[in-house]
Amino acid sequence: MDFFFEKLTRPLLFKQDPESAHELAITGLKLLASIAPLRLAMEKFNLVKYSKPVNVFGVDFPNCVGLAAGFDKDATCWRAMPALGFGFSEIGTFTKHKQAGNQKPRVFRYPESEAVVNSMGFPNEGVEAAAKKLAKTISSKKTPLGINIGKSKITPLEEAASDYIFSFNTLADYADYFCLNLSSPNTPELRKLQTKEYLHSLLNSIQQANIQRSEKLAKKRIPLLVKIAPDLSFSEIDEILETMQDLSYDGIVATNTTISRPEKSSYEKSGGLSGKPLFEKSLEIVSYISKRTHGKLPIIGVGGINDAECAGKMLNAGASLIQIYTPMIFRGPFYAKYLAKSAQWRHETWL
């Protein structure tokens, strides 16, 4: 862990409530993103570039460590992330409609276990606002950009497909891949979209929009991924994998936050639990998916990767890429660089 962060920065940030501290971090990174000479100098020093890029679903990643969705909710600071060492960023979750999210306070830290509970509910300015920002900044993109989209709270489940398609079409010009968030526990009934009743129709509709755009513009299809919950049974995961395979989906993100709680835990707040306590469950699911698909479906592993050993286990279990968010809160802003360097030998010796 960075000494300066551990002894000085983190204690100051932890004196504020978690959401205020997050907004302060976003403001600082937004400033960094706007100062090109500083941003580029830090990128040159911190961005770990493997001797050969990590190629996943047709996209080249300079290293295997990415920023998970939920950090940059409004496309404001993603350009600064390579300067911290990230090989890619996933922004959002964006929804068709602007929404404030759930009532505050809605984020709670548990430093003793390096965990966070949140009940955010997709607060964001909406996809059209995000598109305007991206149109002005996308030319300075240095690493792949994933875009995470979800269902607006006011949209009925029966109309979810049109909601996702609107978001897809609005942001498609800026995405290296899309991730469909069907698994946040903080939007009522959203997780029902992972079930048989809704899944095939929803995923098919979005893939058809993707194909139509591809044919109209004579461009390649944009890779489509699905982000799943860690609270699914293996049989439910099998149904999702079968549907994704039938519809030629490109990858899966495992996993989102969990609504379950470890035995004898002190996480009394409701919402999704992330961080260290999630790791073993996420690892189990990544391993299961990899074995079930014979390693053919690209996996982005996320959930509690709080040291190099965890990163290694996740990659060894079958993840092609990994993502972090909560560990940065406890380990510091340059944690991605540390993880990317720790995984570099593995990638380069496996070439």
Image: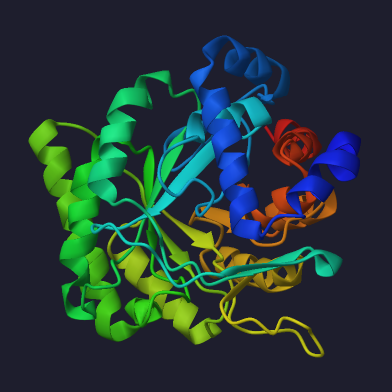
Displayed quadrant of residue 226:
bottom left
**Image location of residue 276, percent across then percent down:** 76, 65
Displayed quadrant of residue 191:
bottom left
Q: Which quadrant holds the N terminus?
A: top right
In the rendered image, the vertical position of residue 102 relative to residue 214, given as above or below: below
Q: Residue furthest top?
A: 37
Q: Residue at x 69, y 26 (%)?
A: 48
Q: How many numbered marks, from 0 up?
A: 0
**Image location of residue 322, percent across then percent down:** 62, 49
In the rendered image, the vertical position of residue 350 relative to residue 232, given as above or below: above
Q: Residue furthest left?
A: 216
Colouring style: rainbow
**Image location of residue 130, percent across then percent down:** 31, 42
Residue 87 visible in rendering: no
> Would residue 140 appear left or right of 87 to someone viewing this image?
left
In terms of depth relative to the viewer, which is nearer, 245 or 67? Answer: 67
Q: Which quadrant holds the C terminus?
A: top right
In the rendered image, the vertical position of residue 142 relative to residue 97, given as above or below: above
In the rendered image, the vertical position of residue 215 relative to residue 227, given as above or below: above
> Would residue 7 appear left or right of 224 to someone viewing this image?
right
Q: Residue at x 87, y 35 (%)?
A: 4
In terms of depth relative to the viewer, which is nearer, 67 or 198? Answer: 67
> Would residue 181 appear left or right of 314 to someone viewing this image?
left
Q: Residue furthest front?
A: 15
> Would residue 7 appear left or right of 211 to someone viewing this image?
right
**Image location of residue 347, percent across then percent down:** 70, 36
Q: Residue furthest bottom?
A: 264
Residue 257 visible in rendering: yes
